Image (cartoon, grey):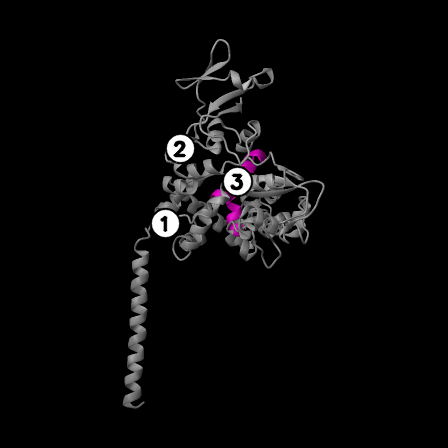
Amino acid sequence: MNKKTAYYSGIFILLVYLNLATGSLFASSADSNIPMYSDENIAAKINDLGGHIEFKYTKEVKDYIRRYTKPGRSGSEKILGRIPVYFPVFEEKIKDKKLPEELKVLAIVESHLDVGAYSKAGAAGLWQLIKGTARQYDLSVRKNFDERYSVEESTDAALDYLSDLYGQFNDWTLALAAYNCGPGNVRKAIRRSGGKRDFWKIIKYLPKETRNYVPKFIAISYLLEHYKEYGIEPQMPDKRYFETAEAIVYKHLTFREISDVTNVPMDVIRKMNYAYRKNYIPANSKGYKLTLPKQALYSLLEYYNYNQIEFSKDHNYDFSKYILNNFSREIAMELLGSKYKYDIEVLQVRKPKIIFTENNEKLKLGNKIVDISKYKVNQFESSFIYHELKPGESIDQIAMDYGVKMEDVMRWNDIHLSSPPRSGSILKIEK
């Protein structure tokens, strides 16, 4: 090697060293803001999670926690932001079926709450159901309509499948493993272990992916409880996903038509209605569900004059309450508006004290006496109470205060979006 070659080689090595040192410096600076907890501390927090799943702190769990809180922080923030869109649905159905609440975490393990997730093995949707399992639990899987992408229907199917798996193994941790690799593989692992029916005792006999499946479940469960301690901030999606309503549609209706009428972008319509694979709702006799932002749905219904489109009465998930209970005041205000500035107090349904006068033609709203004789209260309307609309009050706010649906308030008072009531108007609310 001549002197010139040696000189340039030395410069190259120095530059590589400086680059690595600088990268290490920046990495250390970034990681310095992330708290470090001892294994004993994390293990104690995991044990506190309790529940029906057998939580353990293992090397695999530790690796997943590090992944979600350090290099994978941005992904964790996206997952956390999707939680209020889907968890209210999961929790309501889990409660109805009397299943362990922890099962909602499984959708994160399966799809990271990406409603359009699709795997190489052909599993689809939030719960990553394959065609055979989906059809076994009465989901429609067709080219133009695939209910594996429907939030409510796929959740019902996944939870029923998990319930059946628990019936086979009488152990929720084994049921999770069977959800991943199939009940046959779990039974095979039990046989090879000499008949043990404990996930941690048969783990080495399970497929490799399944060995990491439960540790991943545990790490995500830990993250949901302790993400704030790591300075992780949920990356919240568009506000429109939290104020939605559903309609039942019988006519052929394209997403382009819906977008043209409502001004809702096509990508939002798709995400809210991912089961329709060809961007349209086919004509049908049983009624297909359409989910849209509330105001957009009202506009669509009025545009078609309720012809072959009608309100769904089953959409009753309280996304606002979930956000207030599980996220900071700042995030709640950003998503739900300044009317939630009093945080959790707004969840208390405080109906105004209403006192009728002797002739039942006047009532007391707060300290004000209102003459309602002109509103012709008759025997058929005796089940209603009355509210005077104050300046700045919205119909959805009144609906929340009285614990009723906004569309019902509009129906009871014959309110149309094109002519909203003015302040001072008297609204009737069914008791």
What is the secondary structure assignment of the residue under circle 1? helix
Percent of width and height locating residue 25: 29, 63
Percent of width and height locating residue 352: 44, 21
Q: Residue at x 49, y 38 (%)?
A: 319
Q: Are marks 2 and 1 in contact (CB under 8 Å)?
A: no
| Marked residue nearer the N-terminal end (2 or 1) | 1
Position of the N terminus by quadrant: bottom left
Amino acid at circle 1? Asp
398 relative to 5 in the view: left or right:
right
Q: Are marks 3 and 2 in contact (CB under 8 Å)?
A: no
Q: Would residue 283 be visible to someone looking at this image? A: yes
The residue that disc 2 covers is 344
The residue that disc 1 covers is 39
Q: Quadrant of residue 410?
A: top right
Magenta run includes residue 88: yes
The residue that disc 3 covers is 295
Percent of width and height locating residue 5: 31, 87
